[in-house]
Image (cartoon, rainbow, N blue to C red):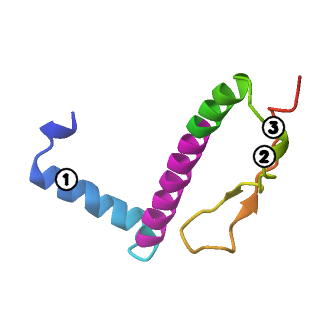
Amino acid sequence: MIGNLKPLEILLIIAVIVLLFGAKKLPEMARSLGKSARILKSEAKAMKKDGEAEADAAAPAADQSAQQPVAPRTIQAAPGDVTSARPVNETNRTTQG
């Protein structure tokens, strides 16, 4: 469907978007969309890593007493943006029976 659009139609769509949201809001909206995509990607990667860690935890460990305490994970909206970082409250699934 998108491939069927002619250049004039694309320009008309862009003009309508600029008129609706204004030229000042568009960069802010694009920035927030990028941050959201980055957060989604990092969370998906963290979930995959957690799944692999749970699979490894199911196998008997040689020496569990030598493990270092794990620091809590934080979610960060953008690299270097510490104002929006927040700790993730989650239970430790490896200690639950």
> Is disc 1 placed on a helix, strand or loop?
helix
Measure how far apart labels 2 and 1 are at the Cα level. Answer: 57 Å
Is residue 46 covered in magenta? yes
For the C terminus, give its image quadrant.
top right
Mark closer to the chain start, 1 or 3: 1
Query: For the residue carrying disc 2, how many other residues have a C-alpha within 10 Å: few (<14), some (14-19), or many (20+)?
Result: few
**Dots 3 and 2: beta carbons under 8 Å?**
yes
- Residue type at mark 1? Ile
Identify the secondary structure beneath mark 2. loop
In the rendered image, is residue 91 in sight?
Answer: no
Q: Earlier in the sequence, mark 2 or mark 1?
A: 1
Q: Name the residue under label 1.
A: 10
- Residue placed furthest toward the front: 62
From which residue to which does the magenta span run?
A: 27-47
**Left or right of 71 on screen, residue 28:** left
Where the N terminus falls, by quadrant?
A: top left
- The Cα atoms of the two marked residues, 1 and 3, are separated by 60 Å
* Residue 94 picture quarter: top right
7, above or below 51, in the image: below
Residue 34's spot in the image, x, y percent?
Answer: 45, 59
As shown in the figure, which amino acid type bears the numbered disc 2? Gln
According to the picture, the residue beneath numbered tag 2 turns out to be 67
Q: Residue 64 carries which label?
A: 3
Is the magenta region chiefly helix, strand or loop?
Answer: helix
Q: x, y percentage for residue 54? A: 68, 29
Decide which of 50, 9 is in the foreground and name it. Answer: 50
Please tell me which residue is depicted at 53% across the width and 43% down the height of the picture: 45
User: How far across and how far down the image is residue 8, in percent?
Assistant: 12, 54
* Residue 57 drawn at (x, y percent): 71, 29
Which of 11 and 57 lies nearest the eye of the viewer? 57
Q: Nearer the viewer, residue 84 or 5?
A: 84
Quarter-of-image position of residue 49 = top right
